[in-house]
Image (cartoon, rainbow, N blue to C red):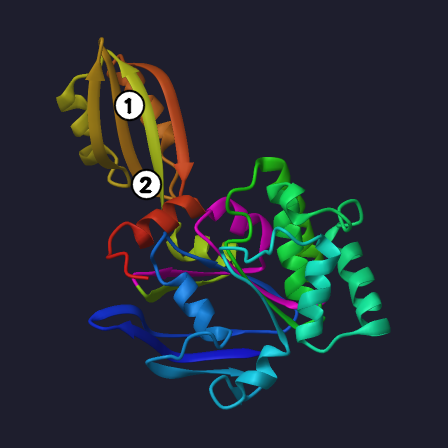
Amino acid sequence: MIKVTDLSKNYGSVKAVRSISFDLNDGEIVGFLGANGAGKTTTLKMMTGYLVPSAGSITVNDMDIIDYAHDIQKEIGYLPELNPLYTEMRVYEYLEFLAGIRKINGKEFKEALARVVEQCGLRGVVHKSISDCSKGYKQRIGLAAAMIHDPKILILDEPVTGLDPNQIVEIRRLIKSLGKEKLVFMSSHILQEIQATVDRIIIINNGNIVANGTSDELMGDFMGNVLLNMEIKGATTESIEHIQAVLPSVKYISLNESKGIQSVQFEYGKDKDPREDLFKYAVKNKWSILKMNPRTTNLEDIFRDLTMEGDKNA
């Protein structure tokens, strides 16, 4: 278990991370979501012991990251955003080099190599030069390097950046598989990828935690209203604006007109569907309804709402 408490990081006058707190539990995949510069990478570097916090604490199984950095790093596999590969090496040479640094040699290395080759799907490239591998395979090699010592915790910084859709699906499957036996904490600014992969989402903006929960919990917190987009012919501005007086549950938002068609947006509570009453009102006022499209809040709306403003400091 990882516990982050009142964690801050300052670069001079710039506050990259601002007194954030959250817990990560064994056996879950947690997504760390935020716009570019929100503080994701700075936080991950502190969690892996590469950066010293300005304030606050990080504990892994009750061990403080400052006091027990060496012991904790034995239990963490870290894939940075900029995958640090020695491209002149062959895949197995690179993994052997990294294993040797961790004093994994001989039979122990052969067993570790076989494990990560199988887990990361590297069987077809293990004897290739890294420079000859595709971007997708290079990400797999980076994951294998993070896993060569069989850590209990994987911390992945933007693991699908620069990958094509097929490669993203492959890495997603791999991460979900790894999450069955390890604690996985992965950052991204791609909401759809996080949503498809993780059990829980933490959103950071301008160095602050602004949301923490499952997709359903976040939707439940924010999905209070439904936006109704309508296209109408034959309506007047007065008759459209008068709807609020006739139907108090409906809030008039906006009106645009082009070529005789009015595009109108209303808002109403998700437990009060006024569409039937709106239809009757339209018939009474001799409107022609071309479209009536309700749209509930989704995670993209939530993310945009939480991260639209704020400085990009990290």
Residue closest to the far front: 88
48 left or right, relative to 145? left
Please state the horizontal and vertical placement of residue 154, each as a whole percent of the image: 61, 66
The residue at 28%/56% (across/down) is 312
Residue closest to the far left: 238
Q: Which mark is residue 268?
A: 2
Is any atom of residue 206 visible in this view? yes
Most foreground residue, 277 or 211: 211
235 left or right, relative to 178? left
Q: Quadrant of residue 263?
A: top left
The residue at 66%/69% (across/down) is 27
* Marks 2 & 1, CB-CB < 8 Å contact: no
Q: Quadrant of residue 119?
A: bottom right
Q: Quadrant of the N terminus?
A: bottom right
Residue closest to the far top: 259
**Dot 1, crowdedness within 10 Å: few (<14), some or many (≥20)?**
some
Of helix, strand and loop, which one carries label 1? helix
Q: Is residue 65 magenta?
A: no
Please state the horizontal and vertical placement of residue 84, each as a whole percent of the image: 55, 58
The residue at 64%/58% (across/down) is 143
